């Protein structure tokens, strides 16, 4: 009895530690007070409504959406062939290539952002949006390669070989046989890349410029001058959006099989 009680206690404390901050942010965003505080000073939707009235939030949201969508698409265009080559062929230094592709995950984001700023943006005078796009694509690429590789590992290679023996070219077999069978993995990689890019902070912090900021960076800048609950309300909305995306992906794609 005591052992079961301890197990449930530890479980409850762990769950509370993990999701407690989320409930605090939601409650703070629904506060009727004038400043960010917990417990909330009454309940109101005024700060949720104000989120949609702040011009900088709208502009940075559109930028973050564009970077997340097109950066993920670019990472998939690069990552799918890389994953296929690593999964189907015994390449020389294959493990080294895997490590290089995974470097943006292994190296802290602050170092990646500083390196891109010092050796890409400044010497080449690259536009801020272009630098952000390149950085987000590079950050998403390892996830695309890993998730698509997991999907390819579940696809028998003899199915593709059968298509080749029946007269299909290697490229035709890829598009007609391989690609349709790994589409769930590609969609899962897109969702993971989208969420990762949209919530990216360290790299975006270094590469943002005057008038060009992603939504997380804009939220940090907003808190430097204003301390009302609108940022908490926006954080809650973004958390609900991320949860909804992951829930739908798990429900229809079996997201957990790939990550």
Image: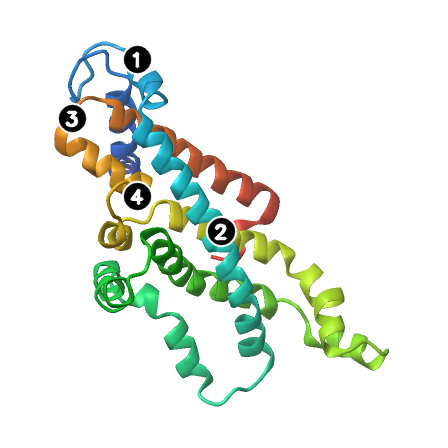
Among the two numbered marks 2 and 3 on one chain, the one whose residue lies closer to the N terminus: 2
Disc 2 to disc 4, C-alpha distance: 17 Å
Say if mark 3 contacts mark 1, CB within 8 Å.
no
Name the image quarter holding residue 113: bottom left
Q: CA distance from mark 4 to mark 3?
A: 19 Å
- For the point 29% across and 32% down, the residue is 22
Q: Which mark is nearer the camera, 2 or 1?
A: 2
Marks 3 and 1, the one that precedes in the sequence: 1
- 63 and 1: which is toward the camera: 63
The residue tagged with tag 4: helix, strand or loop? loop
**Residue 128 point in image, percent of width and height:** 31, 52
Of tags 4 and 3, the one toward the viewer is: 4
Instruction: Residue 46: give its label.
Output: 1
Q: Which residue is mark 4?
A: 212
In this picture, is 18 found above or below 71? above
Q: CA distance from mark 2 to mark 1?
A: 33 Å
In the image, which disc is placed on residue 226? 3
Circle 2 SS class: helix
- Residues marked 4 and 3 touching at CB (< 8 Å): no
Residue at 68% x, 76% y is 157
Instruction: Classify mark 3: helix, strand or loop.
Output: loop
- Quarter of the image for the N terminus: give it: top left
């Amino acid at each position: 009895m005591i052992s079961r009680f301890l197990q449930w206690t530890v479980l409850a404390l762990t769950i509370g530690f993990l999701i407690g901050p989320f409930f605090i942010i939601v409650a703070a965003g629904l506060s009727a007070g004038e400043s960010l505080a917990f417990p909330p000073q009454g309940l109101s939707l005024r700060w949720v409504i104000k989120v949609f009235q702040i011009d900088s939030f709208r502009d940075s949201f559109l930028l973050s959406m564009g970077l997340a969508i097109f950066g993920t698409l670019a990472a998939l265009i690069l990552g799918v062939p890389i994953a296929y080559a690593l999964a189907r062929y015994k390449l020389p230094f294959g493990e080294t290539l895997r490590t290089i592709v995974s470097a943006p995950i292994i190296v802290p984001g602050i170092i990646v952002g500083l390196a891109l700023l010092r050796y890409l943006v400044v010497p080449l005078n690259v536009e801020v949006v272009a630098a952000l796009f390149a950085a987000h694509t590079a950050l998403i690429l390892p996830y695309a390669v890993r998730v698509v590789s997991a999907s390819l590992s579940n696809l028998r290679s003899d199915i593709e070989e059968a298509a080749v023996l029946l007269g299909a070219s290697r490229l035709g077999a890829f598009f007609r046989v391989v690609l349709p069978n790994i589409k769930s993995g590609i969609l899962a990689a897109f969702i993971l890349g989208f969420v990762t890019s949209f919530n990216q902070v360290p790299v975006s912090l270094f590469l943002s410029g005057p008038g060009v900021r992603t939504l997380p960076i804009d939220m940090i800048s907003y808190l430097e001058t204003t301390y009302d609950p609108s940022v908490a309300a926006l954080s809650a909305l973004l958390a609900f959006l991320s949860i909804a995306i992951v829930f739908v992906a798990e429900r229809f794609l079996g997201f957990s099989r790939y990550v």
